[in-house]
Amino acid sequence: MHKAGYVTIIGKPNAGKSTLLNAFLKQKLSITNNKPQTTRKSILGILSENEYQIIFQDTPGIIEPRYLLQKRMMDFYRRALDDADLILFLIEPDDPLINHDMKTLPLFQDIFVKLRTKIVAIINKVDLIDQSKTEFVHSALEKTGLFDKIFAVSALHKFGTDELLRMVVTYLPEGPKYYPDDIVSSEPEKFFVSEIIREKILELYQDEIPYSCEVVIEEFKEREKGKDLIRAVIVAEKDSQKGILIGAKGAAIKRLGESSRKEIEEFLEREVFLELRVKVRQNWRSDEKFLRQFGYDIPKDE
């Protein structure tokens, strides 16, 4: 008997979804940061074992969209819900949602009213609270009657994640593998390279800068001799943001390039020559043409 299925990880921004995916896979696939809205698209992480294959879907944090990019992010999230055999709903111990009737909130209608998929609540970051608080949150979530099971974990410290994984397998349908064993994601290498650069922007820049930026890989060339060549463009919305990204005498973008290159080389396990440029595309986050160009469109079902 072999099991295979799709498991979608959802939750509000900064709940720890990407960290949990990385813990399951035992490697870094999704970028993480303490700033909210780090994940913009659904990312597949594939875990293959002899008895099962799980296709995890990391999703953008659930938000009320304020502009077109955020609307597209929520489109990715809803599409991932449609594909799911099981949903893992991450929640932080101090989230006010715990004291609300979540099925009455418009943001959560897709999950608790329209869907018939099984949902497991995951109380994340329990390393930050004591046992009594964990038990209180567990009891509060149990009383809602919305969840098939409730688990407490610390994705960052991998506490409880092995037990959670064993439970996930029990919910998978029987069936053959969707992907070969050596595939850990359906995304190409250049996607993860762009994500690494965007992660470094989140780390190195403050305020609105990270949210106003997109990273586009213009050239990705593997070479038999010498380092691989990667040319990336950072797209900003304003000329003032371009100046901040570059910094005085190019110091800021040089620091960004050095930090990005180091992690890209660790990810690819080979040396690269990384070239970064900055372009301005006014109001790209609300421009349909640019969003399609940057990959923020949902393919129609055939």
Image (cartoon, rainbow, N blue to C red):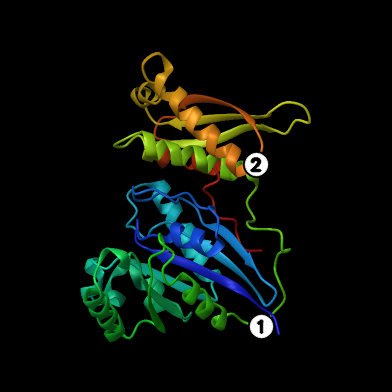
Q: Residue 256 at x, y = what percent?
A: 45, 29
Front-most of residues 139 and 85: 139
Q: Residue 104 at x, y = what percent?
A: 27, 75
Q: Nearer the viewer, mark 1 or mark 2?
A: 2
Q: Amino acid at mark 1?
A: Glu
Residue 172 in the image: above or below residue 79: below
Q: Residue 54 at x, y = what percent?
A: 60, 70
Task: Answer few, some or many: residues within 10 Å of disc 1's Cα (few below 14, many 20 plus, some between 14 and 19).
Answer: some
Front-most of residues 37 and 123: 123
Residue 145 in the image: above or below residue 156: below
Residue 61 in the image: above or below residue 212: below
- CA–CA distance in space, label 1 to label 2: 35 Å
Q: Is residue 279 visible?
A: yes
> For residue 258, which numbered disc appears in the image?
none
Residue 42 in the image: above or below residue 8: above
Q: Which residue is mark 1?
A: 174
Q: In the rendered image, which quarter contains the C terminus? A: bottom right
> In the rendered view, does 12 fall on the left or right side of 85?
left
Q: Residue at x 50, y 80 (%)?
A: 167
> For residue 269, which numbered disc appears in the image?
2
Q: Residue at x 45, y 50 (%)?
A: 40
Q: Is residue 287 visible?
A: no
Front-most of residues 124 and 279: 124
